[in-house]
C-alpha cells in the first residue's frame, strides 16, 4: 500500500484495460527477433523510447498497466511533462489494442486460425423465460451452446471425456500430443454457439472419438490408425474386459456415427482443426536456459496427461500449453521464476491455471 501511495504521489498512472485485458499477453509478447541471437523487440520498449514513459503490467492486479513518466512532484513543469508522457503512452497502447482487436476479429472470421480465446470471452447467450415466444427469444434459443444441446447433466462429463481420450491414445501407442490435439478440437466444438438439433443424433462419445480421429490423422509422428483401430482401442477403454467385433452390426453403426460426427465437427469449425503443438514451449524455455531440456520434456509430458487436459477449455483454448507447462513445473517444485519472462506469463493467470489443474485432479 505504501508503494502504491508513493507511485501516486510521483504521478504514476495505472491504466485500466477492462475488457481489453484479453490482449495484455499479446502486448507483452516479443514483436520480432533481431539477427543477433537472444535479442527481442517488445512493444513496451517501443512505447518507452517514443513517449519517455515506462510501461509494465501491474503486479497487484491482472488488468492494469503501470505507466511511469517520471517524478511529477518536483515542480509544476515536471508535472506537465510527466502528464504528457503518460498521455502519449496511453494513446500508443490504445492504438495497439485496436490493431490487435482488428487482427483477432479477422482471424475469428477465417476458416483457419480462429481466435478461440476471443470466443470464450464473448458473453454467453441467456435462455429466455418459459413464457416468452418472441422472435428474439427463439433466436436466443437457437444459439445455446453445443454442450447444452448434448444435455451434459454431469459437469464432469467433459472432463471424463478428455481422460478417456488420453487413455485411448495411450492404448493406441500414439504421442500425448495427439490426445492434447484431440481435446482441443473437442473443446473448440462443444464451446461453439450451436443450432438446436445439430447434435440430436450424436452421443458425447461420438464427438470425442471423431475429435480423436481427426487429431490422429493430423499427426505426422506415426502412421495414423484406421477408424477400426481407433474404435477397438476406444472399446477397451469404454468397456474393459469386453471383446470388440469389428464385423458386428453394432461396430458398423458406431463407425457410421463417428464418420458423421467427424463431418459435422469439420463443418462447424470451418475446418479449423489445426494446432501449433508444444514444441515451441520446449524451445523457448531451453533456448533461454530457463530450464534444462530433460526437465522440460518431463514437465511437458505431465502437462499433456489426462487430468491436465481435463482442466477445461479456459486453460486450453484461452491460456494455452505454456501455462499448463509452467503450472506443472511448479507442482514438480521446479524453479518457475525464469519461465515467467521466457514464456511471457502473467503470475496471477498462472496461479489460476494451477488451481484449475488441482481441481481437475481432485474431482476426476
Image (tube, rainbow, N blue to C red):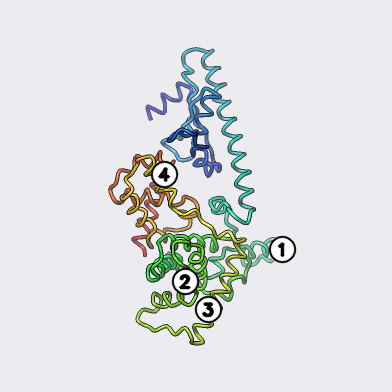
Disc 2 crowd, CA 10 A, few/some/many (<14, 14-19, 20+): some
Q: Nearer the viewer, mark 2 or mark 1?
A: 2
Within-10-Å neighbours for mark 3: few <14, some 14–19, many 20+: many
2 vs 4, front mark: 2
Q: 90 or 151: which is nearer to us?
A: 90
Q: Which residue is mark 4?
A: 284
First-in-chain label (3 vs 4): 3
**Point 37% across, 65% down: residue:** 364
| Cα–Cα span, label 1 and label 3 | 39 Å
**On residue 225, which mark appears?**
2
Local secondary structure at mark 1: helix
Q: Which residue has dot 3 on it?
A: 255
* Label 2: which secondary element: loop
Q: CA distance from mark 3 to mark 2?
A: 14 Å
The x and y percentages for residue 336 are 33, 43
Which is more foreground, mark 4 or mark 1?
A: 4
Q: Earlier in the sequence, mark 3 or mark 2?
A: 2
Q: Position of residue 343 (x, y in %)?
A: 42, 43
Picture layout, residue 17 above or below residue 356: above
**Of the residues under marks 4 and 1, which one precedes in the sequence?**
1
205 vs 170, nearest the viewer = 170
- Looking at the image, the residue that sits furthest to the bottom is 248
Badge nearest the viewer, 3 or 2: 2
Q: Residue at x 67, y 65 (%)?
A: 138
Q: Quadrant of the N terminus?
A: top left
Q: Give the secondary structure at mark 3.
A: helix
- In whole angstroms, how far apart are the C-alphas of marks 2 and 1? 47 Å
Give the spatial CA distance, label 4 vs label 1.
Answer: 51 Å
Q: List x then y, in percent, for residue 281.
A: 42, 48
Amino acid at each position: 500500500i505504501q508503494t502504491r501511495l508513493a507511485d501516486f504521489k510521483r504521478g504514476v498512472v495505472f491504466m485500466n484495460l477492462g475488457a481489453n485485458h484479453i490482449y495484455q499477453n499479446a502486448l507483452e509478447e516479443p514483436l520480432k527477433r533481431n539477427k543477433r541471437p537472444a535479442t527481442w523487440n517488445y512493444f513496451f520498449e517501443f512505447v518507452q523510447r517514443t513517449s519517455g514513459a515506462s510501461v509494465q503490467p501491474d503486479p497487484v492486479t491482472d488488468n492494469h498497466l503501470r505507466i511511469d513518466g517520471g517524478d511529477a512532484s518536483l515542480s509544476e513543469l515536471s508535472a506537465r511533462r510527466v502528464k504528457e508522457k503518460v498521455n502519449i503512452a496511453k494513446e500508443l497502447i490504445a492504438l495497439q489494442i485496436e490493431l490487435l482487436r482488428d487482427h483477432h476479429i479477422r482471424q475469428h472470421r477465417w476458416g483457419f486460425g480462429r481466435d478461440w480465446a476471443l470466443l470464450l470471452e464473448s458473453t454467453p447467450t441467456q435462455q429466455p423465460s418459459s413464457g416468452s415466444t418472441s422472435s428474439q427469444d427463439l433466436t436466443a434459443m437457437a444459439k445455446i451452446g453445443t454442450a447444452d444441446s448434448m444435455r451434459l447433466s454431469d459437469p464432469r462429463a467433459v472432463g471424463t471425456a478428455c481422460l478417456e481420450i488420453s487413455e485411448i491414445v495411450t492404448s493406441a501407442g500414439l504421442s500425448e500430443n495427439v490426445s492434447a490435439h484431440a481435446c482441443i478440437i473437442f473443446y473448440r466444438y462443444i464451446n461453439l454457439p450451436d443450432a438446436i438439433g445439430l447434435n440430436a443424433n450424436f452421443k458425447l462419445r461420438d464427438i470425442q472419438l471423431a475429435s480423436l480421429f481427426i487429431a490422429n490423422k493430423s499427426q505426422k509422428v506415426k502412421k495414423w490408425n484406421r477408424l477400426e483401430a481407433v474404435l477397438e482401442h476406444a472399446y477397451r477403454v469404454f468397456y474393459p474386459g469386453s471383446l470388440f467385433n469389428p464385423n458386428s452390426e453394432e461396430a458398423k453403426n458406431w463407425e457410421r456415427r463417428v464418420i458423421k460426427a467427424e463431418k459435422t465437427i469439420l463443418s462447424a469449425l470451418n475446418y479449423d482443426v489445426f494446432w501449433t503443438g508444444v514444441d515451441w514451449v520446449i524451445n523457448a524455455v531451453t533456448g533461454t536456459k530457463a530450464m534444462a531440456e530433460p526437465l522440460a520434456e518431463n514437465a511437458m509430458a505431465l502437462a499433456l496427461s489426462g487430468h491436465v487436459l481435463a482442466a477445461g477449455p479456459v486453460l486450453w483454448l484461452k491460456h494455452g500449453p505454456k501455462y499448463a507447462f509452467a503450472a506443472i513445473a511448479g507442482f514438480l517444485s521446479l524453479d518457475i521464476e525464469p519461465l515467467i519472462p521466457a514464456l511471457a506469463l502473467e503470475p496471477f493467470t498462472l496461479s489460476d491455471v494451477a488451481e484449475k489443474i488441482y481441481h481437475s485432479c481432485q474431482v476426476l
